[in-house]
Amino acid sequence: QVHLVESGGDSVQAGGFLRVSCAASEYISPSRGYCMGWFRQAPGKEREEVAQIDLNGGKIYADAVKGRFTISQDNAKNIMYLQMNSLKPEDTAMYYCAAGVPPFYTSCSTSDFDVWGQGTQVTVSS
């Protein structure tokens, strides 16, 4: 069973930047048939997908973070990153990394992600 552990969450001012990391217990990547993604959940709101790397290595972003967030993966270290720039108070949430194997397509739907980390808190103050 693959384990994912997030780190790097912090409290920052609006307009600032932060990078959160996700360390995997073993090598998982699109080349091995896995989608990799970041999700977030704010208090009182549903969990939402923020970004994903699909089986082709393509990067998919939610509209709310396009142009501000960048997802990347360091295969040598089994670590995935989410670089967050120009942070806004509405980015405040618990951030989770996830991995999954899509049954049909090259990208994962939310239900395809079946390995989750425990989360790291990001708080953006105005």
Image (tube, rainbow, N blue to C red):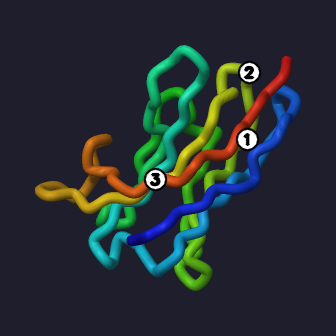
Task: Specify the amino acid type for callout 1.
Answer: Asn
Task: Specify the amino acid type for callout 3.
Answer: Trp
**Which residue shows up at 61% across the image and 46% down it?**
119
| Residue 53 or residue 77, whichever sits in front | 77
Mark 3 nearby-residue class (10 Å; few <14, some 14–19, many ≥20):
some
Helix, strand or loop under label 1: loop
Residue 6 relative to residue 58: left or right: right
**Residue designated by label 1:** 85
CB atoms of marks 3 and 1 within 8 Å:
no
Helix, strand or loop under label 2: helix
Residue 70: % across, % down? 59, 51
Helix, strand or loop under label 3: strand
**Residue designated by label 2:** 89
**Residue designated by label 3:** 116
Q: Residue furthest left?
A: 104
Question: Which mark is drawn over residue 5?
Answer: none
Mark 2 nearby-residue class (10 Å; few <14, some 14–19, many ≥20):
some
Residue 78 relative to residue 112: left or right: right
Residue 123: % across, % down? 77, 30
Q: How far apart, in angstroms, are the residues tagged by discs 3 and 1? A: 24 Å
Q: From this viewpoint, is residue 53 visible?
A: no
Task: Specify the amino acid type for callout 2.
Answer: Pro
Camera-near label (3 vs 1) is 3
Residue 110: % across, % down? 31, 41
Q: How far apart, in angstroms, are the residues tagged by discs 3 and 2? A: 25 Å
Q: From this viewpoint, is residue 98 visible?
A: yes
Q: Residue furthest bottom?
A: 76
CB atoms of marks 1 and 2 within 8 Å:
no
Classify the position of the N terminus by image quarter. Answer: bottom left
Picture quadrant where residue 14 is located:
top right
Classify the position of the C terminus by image quarter. Answer: top right
Q: How far apart, in angstroms, are the residues tagged by discs 1 and 2? A: 12 Å
